[in-house]
Image: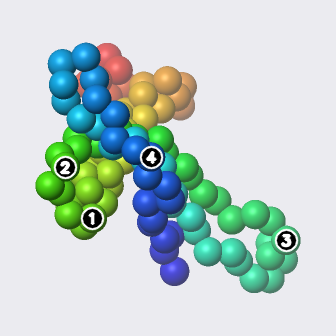
Amino acid sequence: MGPSVSVASVDEPIMDAVGQQWSPATIAVAWPSTSGPTAELEAPSIHIRVLAPYRPNMTVEELRQAHIRAALNVLSSALLALEESAPSPQGVLPTPRSA
């Protein structure tokens, strides 16, 4: 079974210096616990703090989708940074980004 994704907390919207409104939130991604010999180990989870563009007339579902899109952007950027900082195994050619 795959992980569950939830918008764990949403804070009050904030306004930046140019008047754009943002909605801070925490997105939680949690894998289910296992059974067997690893049952006592804590299941993996990720908590991502994001800022999503906010409009006062947004529905709850629109705001949730904006938070999920923001989390996807943060995770994509984080994965690229991890790829670039990971050492290459010997004999493996570097990717175009790291060359």
* Gap between marks 4 and 2 measured at Cα: 14 Å
- Tell me which residue sits at (34%, 41%) in the image: 13
For the residues marked 3 and 4, what is the alpha-carbon distance in whole angstroms? 33 Å
> In the rendered structure, which amino acid carries the disc numbered 4?
Asp
Residue 34 figure quarter: bottom right
The residue type indicated by label 2 comes to Pro
Q: Earlier in the sequence, mark 3 or mark 2?
A: 3
- Position of residue 92 relative to residue 42, above or below, is above
Which residue carries the number 2 mark? 56
Position of residue 46 measured from the top left corner of the image (x, y, whole percent): 56, 52
Residue matched to label 4? 11
| Labelled disc at residue 60 | 1
Instruction: Give the labeled residue for mark 3.
Output: 40
- Element type where label 2 sits in the image: loop
Identify which residue, 30 or 15, lies in the foreground.
15
| Circle on res. 42 | none
For disc 3, the neighbor class at 10 Å (few under 14, some 14 to 19, many from 20) is few
Q: Is residue 29 above or below residue 40?
A: above
Q: Nearer the viewer, mark 2 or mark 1?
A: 2
Q: Can residue 71 be seen in the rendering of this structure?
A: yes
Q: Secondary structure at mark 3?
A: loop
Q: Earlier in the sequence, mark 1 or mark 3?
A: 3
Q: Residue at x 80, y 76 (%)?
A: 39
4 or 2: tag closer to the N-terminus: 4
Dot 2: few (<14), some (14–19), or many (≥20) neighbours within 10 Å? few
In the rendered structure, the answer to whether residue 57 lies left or right of residue 6 reads left
Residue drawn at point x = 28 percent, y = 29 percent: 15
Of badges 3 and 2, nearer the viewer stands 2
| Dot 1 or dot 4, earlier in sequence | 4
Left or right of residue 36: residue 11: left
